[in-house]
């Protein structure tokens, strides 16, 4: 039978039950709208929350970890070397935190085609002298330009200009630390290092990452300022931060470079595994809720088509009596189901996009997240593709069983019953 005739009959049956058809299409539309809006909103939140940590975390971090010497003198002695020796309260060896030959390591990393960029860093534990009170903190010495380029440092400087760190003896305080010290921009604060060195630093800005505990203790200065503060030479570096072109390469490259440079290396996926787990769980919940909505709408279509078949048994009998095959009848009802899914799905994708635009314009301002002004929404095309595909699959399955039931109708029995 010609498809044009099948489409015409399907259209006539849908218009004859216009109210039920609109209800079914509305169910699909609502499900797709919620599916797209929910996934876009949830993944926008995931991106924002992960970005609070992952944007500020290098893909690979090189450093020297201070650990006890595994080769103890008693193990080297002839008398006890082959014995089982138990030693308690072993103190760390006198190793240095500084990375040996750091300039050569940085140059080698920058020449690697897999590396996007390299930024040196110094971490120094200090005391902020506030009157008679000493507040503990950490001052990180950074290459200001590299930090802004690779880790979006400038996005988290809420007051002042990050470039002012290039000035000698300047510091950008974490917002929490600044509040505890009542330090304003332009004030001069006194800092004492763990070695007892004292230095006065001018506050040129505030830094706020959105993580309260981090902002309470962390502050930033230039590498040269921290080297001067610690009394160390210009080659003194405690950390080398690496950004890769492909994040997935972080674990193997950390092991590879760690062996080559004979240095400790941490990769972002190992250090922040809990964030990836949280993101995966939130995404899974979003998909589960969205698919549940689609399945529920599919049951609605199934019930409506079942009722349509029951009310149109005489029409189906007449169609089969005048030459329509069981396959033709099956196609008619599958066409009805797919039409409902196509129209409802298309409208759902449109309204889902509009809902995302609406959510994106809702103000969301909080002191903990100064860089966020509205709710984040992810408009990734894959959500629309998944939503559209699921609408067609769900409506096809919802129409398959009623269509098979309709194709099995015996016209003789129906006409005799009438």
Image (tube, grey):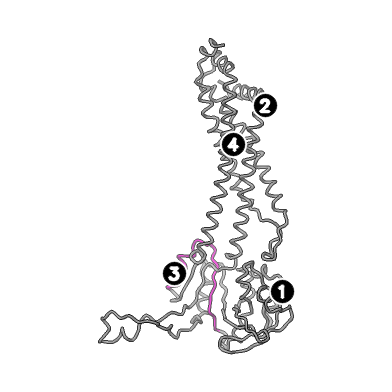
Q: Is residue 298 left or right of residue 88?
A: right
Q: Position of residue 242 (x, y in %)?
A: 54, 70
- Callout in the foreground (3, 1): 1
Cβ–Cβ under 8 Å for marks 3 and 1: no
- Residue at the top extreme? 416
Q: CA distance from mark 1 to mark 2?
A: 63 Å
Q: CA distance from mark 1 to mark 4?
A: 54 Å
Q: Can residue 168 be seen by looking at this rendering?
A: no
Query: Which residues make up the magenta segment?
Result: 235-259
- Residue at the front extreme? 132
Residue drawn at the location 58% of the way across and 61% of the way down: 50
Q: Position of residue 256 (x, y in %)?
A: 44, 69
Give the residue pinned by disc 1: 161
Front position in the image: 119 or 307: 307
Q: Position of residue 123 (x, y in %)?
A: 56, 79
Give the residue pinned by disc 4: 297
Give the residue pinned by disc 2: 18
Classed neighbour count for the residue bearing mark 3: other residues with Cα under 10 Å, few (<14), some (14–19), many (≥20): few
Give the residue pinned by disc 3: 256
Residue drawn at the location 51% of the way across and 13% of the way down: 413
Local SS, label 4:
helix
Does residue 402 lie above or below 142 as drawn? above
Q: Is residue 82 left or right of residue 386?
A: left
* Comes first in the chain, label 1 or label 4: 1
Classed neighbour count for the residue bearing mark 4: other residues with Cα under 10 Å, few (<14), some (14–19), many (≥20): many
């Amino acid at each position: 039978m010609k498809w044009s005739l099948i489409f015409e009959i399907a259209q006539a049956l849908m218009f004859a039950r216009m109210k039920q058809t609109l209800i079914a299409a509305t169910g699909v539309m609502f499900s797709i709208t919620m599916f797209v809006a929910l996934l876009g909103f949830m993944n926008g939140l995931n991106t924002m929350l992960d970005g609070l940590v992952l944007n500020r975390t290098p893909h690979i971090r090189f450093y020297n970890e201070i650990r006890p010497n595994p080769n103890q003198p008693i193990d080297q002695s002839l008398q006890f070397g082959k014995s089982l020796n138990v030693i308690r309260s072993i103190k760390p060896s006198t190793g240095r935190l500084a990375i040996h030959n750091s300039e050569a390591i940085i140059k080698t990393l920058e020449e690697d085609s897999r590396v996007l960029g390299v930024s040196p860093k110094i971490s120094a534990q200090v005391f902020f002298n506030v009157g008679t009170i000493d507040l503990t903190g950490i001052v990180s010495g950074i290459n200001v330009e590299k930090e802004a380029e690779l880790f979006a440092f400038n996005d988290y400087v809420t007051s002042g200009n990050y470039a002012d760190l290039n000035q000698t003896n300047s510091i950008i305080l974490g917002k929490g630390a600044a509040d505890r010290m009542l330090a304003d921009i332009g004030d001069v604060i006194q800092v004492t290092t763990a070695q007892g060195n004292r230095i006065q630093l001018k506050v040129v800005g505030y830094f706020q990452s959105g993580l309260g505990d981090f902002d309470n203790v962390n502050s930033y200065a230039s590498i040269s300022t921290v080297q001067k503060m610690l009394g160390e030479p210009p080659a003194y570096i405690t950390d080398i931060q690496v950004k890769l072109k492909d994040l997935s390469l972080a674990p193997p490259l950390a092991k590879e470079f760690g062996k080559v440079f004979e240095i400790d290396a941490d990769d972002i996926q190992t250090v922040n595994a809990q964030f990836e787990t949280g993101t995966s769980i939130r995404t899974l919940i979003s998909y589960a809720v969205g698919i549940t909505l689609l399945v529920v709408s599919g049951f609605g279509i199934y019930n409506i088509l079942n009722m349509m078949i029951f009310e149109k048994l005489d029409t189906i009998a007449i169609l089969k009596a005048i030459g329509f095959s069981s396959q033709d009848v099956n196609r008619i009802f599958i066409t009805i189901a797919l039409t409902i899914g196509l129209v409802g799905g298309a409208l759902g994708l449109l309204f889902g996009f509009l809902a995302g635009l609406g959510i994106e314009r809702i103000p969301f301002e909080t002191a903990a997240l100064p860089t966020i002004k509205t709710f984040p929404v992810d408009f990734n095309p894959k959500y629309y593709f998944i939503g559209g595909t699921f609408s067609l699959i769900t409506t096809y399955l919802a129409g398959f069983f009623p269509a098979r039931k309709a194709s099995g109708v015996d016209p003789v029995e129906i006409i005799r019953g009438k």
